Image (cartoon, coloured by chain):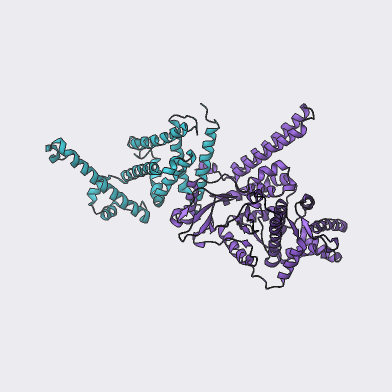
Chain colours: A cyan, B purple
Amino acid sequence: MPTRTSQHRPASSSRPTSGRRQQNKQKTKQVILKVALDLFSRKGFYRTTTKEISRKAGIAEGTLFNYFRTKEDLAMYFMEDQIAGLIAWFQGEKPLQRASLAEQLFAIIHRHLERVGPYEEFVGAVYLRMLQPVSKLNPLSLDTQALSLRYLRFIRDLLAVAEEREEIPHMGDIGAYIFALFHMAIITYWLYDQSKGKENTLALLDRSLKVAVSILRKGGWNW
Amino acid sequence: MELVKNSHPNGAIGRGMRMGRLGLHVVGSYLGYQLQNLLLGSESREERHTKLRRNVSRRVREELAELKGPLMKFGQILSMQTQMLPDESIEELSNLQMRAPGMHPTLARAQFKSSLGRYPEEVFREFEAEPFAAASLGQVHRAMTRSGEKVAVKIQYPAIRTAIENDFKLLRTATLPGRMTGHLPVSILKEVQRGFLEETDYINEGRNIDFLREALADLPYVTAPKVYWDATTDRVLTMSYVDGLTIRDFLSRRPPQEVRNLIGQRLLEMFLFQIHCVHVVHADPHPGNYFFNLEGHIGMVDFGCVKKYSADVSELSRCFIDRSWTNGEKQVQRISRLLWGTPQFSRRAKTREMLRSVSEFYDMVYPPPETRRSVVDFADPALLGALTRNFQEAVRNKLCNAEFAFSSRAELGLYNLLHQLRSRVDTRRVWSGVVERLSETPIEPLPAQRR
């Protein structure tokens, strides 16, 4: 939001200032998220109040409101942060670039589960909200479009590489959409998984990806 | 949610479908063969038969390896029983012993973390992402501890226990056991299931290793691994690395006959020592569990299936080796009860006939002193053939004591190993050596099971 002073400044000098402000804003958002996640994992999502979050983050409750109007906004930021982190992580993992498609996809979902593991209850709450059409977290809402596109493009590019390697036939964009649905299904399964160390999720993830890739490879995919 | 649950790969339905398909493939190709037989002349029948069997056995292997778990174990058991299957099947199935489709590095790491709470690289100084061996329930990776010791880390495939439980649910109802062996009593199936489930618990295996390592310390030529308990859970087992060659590599170096004899003699001594002195047997004798070197050293791995025996087994084995089963009718009855469990033959003559047949086999392995034949040549296929006939006879008559399901498995495995090594062994001398040891101090029994 531009202030009166910034309006009077020449454009050339205003850019770095607003850049820095943007940076500071991001930093504060990260601090709030970190504090909130910490509270969620210790006290639970529903029992944590905004008052506690602002006190722990060392900001006024009103300021917190400036950053995140609702817990839903916080959840959205959490999801964006997760997906951005996931993509950056994957691109930095050299050995994975050479791995089979099944392993790459396994690694992506597994890494995601690893990252959100400590906030299971929060993730469960976010999922419940996502299912509500009026929530801005729902995958078809305009608010989630930027995030969805970023994720879908990332998966599509990954599949395109596998197509080039002739690991799977060409599927167009549909492959990324199908994987996104699969990804959500696995997270749902993971939330319900009561097995030791959630090993049933590992088995399900591994087996279903292998089956899917082998069906695709054998030409089971036919338009 | 229901949908997700039903599509779980470990579900009984999914496996049932796979097994059904396996049955269909095998049946299908046999039908095809029968059809071809009708349509074509008899000139190339033998040739086609061979081709068909090769196709079938490859399919069996692929399906088994895909299913993992107990079915793969069945594959291993079958591959051990070389005399029961045509040559092509043996070749296909013996591939199961060291190789199986495994976990990719990411899954292996994930499973390690899921079980131990930390990633391999946080626990070890070095950890090889690619496994060097497949175990039936998982795979084995080389690693180095922080203090620089070479170790083998066995990681179990996730949710294998559930998978096994499902398989047995199916096996009990499916016709598979009957199809594979003719007759398979429920009591044996239960015993086998108990054994398999025990094998999924690596803590139990670790205890077995500790126990046998100590018990076998008297035999200086055997190496059993040492367990690293701080990196071991029910699904991850870290143990010292056992050096040596697999039987295939060992034989490919054309070891001299003396070395093969020495190893054969030692394997037999180890087996008898375990049965008679320790009352515990390493009961998974498939060749992949043994490592050899040209000095005659033997390394053992995979202690998942270690069976504790009552003294009866030891007595039974003794009765046949020194032929004391023939000492009167009472003894005959007792032995037949020990050997085959409660169901008795209505005719005594039949009992004697069966015992004689078992005894004849033992006479081949331990030639009576009056024959003046002291060295037994295990390369002779007649030996395994006789044992297999006994087995088949017992199975046909639905005679088998569940306790012997595993001891027979171990014994069959041993002779099969000796056969592959083409060892010549003075069995009587080995036996006298073990009898001498018997007089020495007895060994502490295996501690009770945790579960």
Above/below status of A165 relative to A191: above
Count every numbered label the image shows and give the total.
0
Residue B16: quadrant of the picture: top right
Asked whether residue B87 appears in the rendered view, the answer is yes
Residue A72: quadrant of the picture: top left
Residue A99 lies left or right of residue B303; in this view the side is left
Residue B152, horizontal then vertical, whole percent: 54, 55
Q: Nearer the viewer, residue B65 or A62?
A: B65
Q: Which of B252 and B145 is in front in this view?
A: B252
Above/below status of B15 relative to B186: above
Residue B231 lies left or right of residue B76; in this view the side is left
Residue A218, horizontal then vertical, whole percent: 55, 32
Residue B6: quadrant of the picture: top right
Above/below status of A205 relative to B45: below
Which residue is at the far left? Answer: A8
Residue A130, horizontal then vertical, whole percent: 39, 41
**Residue appearing at x 67%, y 56% in the figure:** B191
Residue B262, horizontal then vertical, whole percent: 70, 59
**Residue appearing at x 69%, y 34% in the figure:** B28
Q: For the C terminus of chain B, which image quadrant?
A: bottom right
Asked whether residue A185 appears in the rendered view, the answer is no
Residue B154 lies left or right of residue B70; in this view the side is left
